[in-house]
Image (cartoon, rainbow, N blue to C red):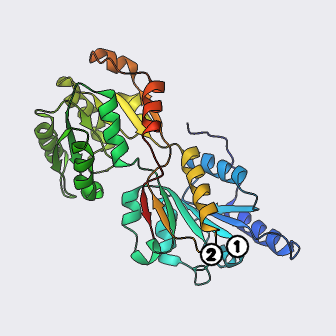
Amino acid sequence: MLAGAGLLGHLASADLWAQGVAGAMAQPAAAPAPLWVVLSERNAAQEEALRVLRGGTALPLQAGLWSDWAQWEQMGSGAALMLLGARALAAWAQRQPPLLPAVPWVAGLLSQSAWAGLPAAVRNQAHAAWLDQPLPRLAELLRLALPDRSRVGVLFGPATRAWRAPLHEALQQRQWQMQSAQLHESDGPAELFTALSRVLDGSEALLLLPDNQVVQPSQFQNLLIAAYRQRLPVVSFSQAHVRAGATMGLFTTPTQAAQHMLDLLRHAQQPGARLRQQWAAQFELAINEPVARSLNLQLPSVAMLAGALMQRSGAPEGATR
C-alpha cells in the first residue's frame, strides 16, 4: 500500500519553504491562505499521505520537513496546519510558534500512544487521526475469523498499558477471554519470552499490539516461532508482519490515514467545531494464506471478513471535546 512515488525527492526543504512563503506573499489579496503540511521525514508512507492531501483539498498546499524552523512563523497566515508523524508532533510540542493557536491543525500518521505522550497543552489544541485500529474492531476480528476459539494471549508494554482494561472489556463482550502480561521498559528478551510463554499457555491465538517493548524487530521471528510451535495463529497490526509470517493483520494505510485527516480538517473548518481525536476510521485486512493452511485454519476470505467488519464499524471512535 506504500507508494514510493518520489513526490518529495525534489523538495529541498529550505528552498521549498522559501518558495512557499514567497508564493503566498505574491498572491493577490483575495487568494486563499495555504494549507501547511509538516512532515516528520521523507519516506514512502509520508509521500503517499502527502499525495492524498494534495488531491483532497482546494487550498494551495505548502509542505516541508519539521526541521525547517526558520519558516514556521510564516504559517500564522495559513488556513490550517497538518503534522504528519510523531517526530513532527514532538518538535511542534517543543516549538509551537505563538501565532498559531488560532489556526486549525490536524495531526496524523502517528499512534495513539505517541499522541498520549505529548504535553496536554498540545493535545488540547489539535484534532488527531491515530493509525491504531479501535480495540472493539480488533476483538470483532477475532470473533469473526476464529469463531470456534475464545481465548487470546496479549502482551502489553509501556505504550499500550492503558489499553488493557478496554481491550479486556471489548473481548469479554464477544465472549472471549484475555490472558495477558505486562512488560516494563527495563525488560529485555528474557523477560519478553517468559511473559510470552505464560500468556500462550492456554491461549488459542496471539494478538500483537503496536508496542515497541513487545514487538521488537530483532525478536519478531522468535515470537512467531514460539506461537506457531503451539499451533496458535498470530493476529497483528502490520501488513509487513503478515508478509513476514503473521497469520492476519488489521492495519491502516497512509492513504486511509490522510483521508481521515482531511475529514477532520473539514470538520475543524466549521464554526464552533469541537476537537476530535479518533482511532482509525478505515482499515485494510491481510491474511497469510500459506501460514493459515499450515495451521489447518479455515478462515473466511479477506473480502468476507472485511465486509463483515465494515458492517459492524460505526462512526470513528475517540474523544470529542
The image's mark for residue 103 is: 2
Residue 143 horizontal side relative to residue 106, left or right: left
Residue 10 in view in this figure: no
Q: Are marks 2 and 1 in contact (CB under 8 Å)?
A: yes
Q: CA distance from mark 2 to mark 1?
A: 7 Å
Disc 2 marks which amino acid? Val
Residue 119 rendering spot, x and y as whole percentages: 40, 74
The quadrant holding residue 4 is top right
Residue 185 horizontal side relative to residue 29, left or right: left
**Residue at the spot x=60%, y=71% of the render?**
104
Residue 311 in view in this figure: yes
Give the SS element for disc 1. loop
Furthest residue to the bottom? 98
Disc 1 marks which amino acid? Gly
Height in image: 103 above or below 264? below
Residue 21 horizontal side relative to residue 250, left or right: right
**Residue at the spot x=41%, y=26% of the render?**
287
The quadrant holding residue 237 is top left
Q: Answer few, some or many: residues within 10 Å of disc 2's Cα (few below 14, many 20 plus, some between 14 and 19).
A: some
